[in-house]
Image (tube, rainbow, N blue to C red):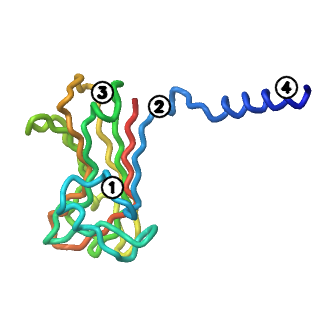
């Protein structure tokens, strides 16, 4: 009987230790580009996936003068959660061939063809060395958005320059 009580007590402790608190109310989506199912919005985004020197695994998203838009995360906000979202943080690991590359990690929310939110982080502000993996993070405030079933969020790298940029280990985190 003591073993059963001890087991119940230990199980309760484990559940309490693993449960989330108010600070952990987040939705996380990650992709190391080894499996792209559910992440890409169209064929041109999948075409950026190449086998190259990756941060993890074997595959990366490559943008250049041919493919300006990198690998894409796209979803209807309503499909992600029925709760009000406060913010979104997007992160990618980038490897550039030129330090002064003209590229932006973009977070956008659109509705019926109209831009509602657009935030971007210029890689040049963060990436200081070539041929080295550097984490790039962009944030967007979603707290002022009113509930709408038509809001579509997109997260992607936009390369407007002439250099080659590789990205890997993509992450999108929503805070409720």
Q: Which mark is residue 143?
A: 3
Q: How many marks?
A: 4
Residue found farthest to the top: 146
Indicate which disc, 4 or 1, sits on the residue closer to the N terminus.
4
Neighbor class of circle 1 (other Cα within 10 Å; few <14, some 14-19, many 20+) is few
The kind of secondary structure element at disc 1 is loop
Question: Residue 133 at x, y = what percent?
Answer: 41, 68
Indicate which disc, 4 or 2, sits on the residue closer to the N terminus.
4
Residue holding disc 4: 5
Gap between marks 3 and 1 measured at Cα = 29 Å
Q: Name the quadrant of the C terminus.
A: top left
Image depth: mark 3 or mark 1 in front: 1
Indicate which disc, 2 or 3, sits on the residue closer to the N terminus.
2
Position above or below: 123 against 132 = above
Gap between marks 2 and 3 measured at Cα = 14 Å
Residue holding disc 1: 37
Q: Which mark is residue 25?
A: 2
The kind of secondary structure element at disc 2 is loop
Query: Which residue is at a point 23% across and 26% down the rendered structure image?
Result: 145
Residue found farthest to the left: 113
The kind of secondary structure element at disc 4 is helix
Residue 105 in sight = no
Query: Which residue is at a point 33% across and 35% down the rendered structure image?
Result: 80
Q: Nearer the viewer, residue 52 or 104?
A: 52
Q: Nearer the viewer, residue 128 or 18?
A: 18
Question: Residue 64 at x, y = what percent?
Answer: 19, 71
Neighbor class of circle 4 (other Cα within 10 Å; few <14, some 14-19, many 20+) is few
Gap between marks 4 and 2 measured at Cα = 32 Å
Gap between marks 1 and 2 measured at Cα = 25 Å
């Amino acid at each position: 009987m003591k073993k059963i009580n001890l087991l119940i007590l230990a199980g309760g402790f484990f559940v309490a230790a693993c449960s989330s608190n108010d600070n952990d109310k987040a939705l996380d989506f990650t992709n190391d580009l080894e499996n792209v199912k559910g992440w890409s919005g169209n064929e041109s985004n999948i075409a950026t996936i190449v086998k190259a020197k990756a941060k993890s695994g074997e595959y990366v998203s490559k943008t250049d003068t041919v493919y300006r838009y990198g690998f894409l995360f796209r979803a209807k906000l309503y499909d992600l959660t029925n709760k009000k979202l406060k913010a979104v943080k997007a992160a990618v690991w980038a490897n550039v061939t030129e330090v002064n590359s003209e590229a932006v990690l973009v977070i956008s929310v659109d509705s019926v063809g109209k831009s509602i939110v657009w935030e971007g982080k210029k890689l040049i502000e963060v990436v200081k060395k070539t041929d080295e993996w550097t984490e790039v993070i962009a944030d967007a405030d979603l707290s002022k958005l009113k509930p709408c079933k038509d809001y579509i969020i997109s997260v992607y790298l936009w390369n407007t320059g002439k250099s080659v940029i590789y990205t890997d280990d993509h992450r999108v985190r929503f805070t409720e």
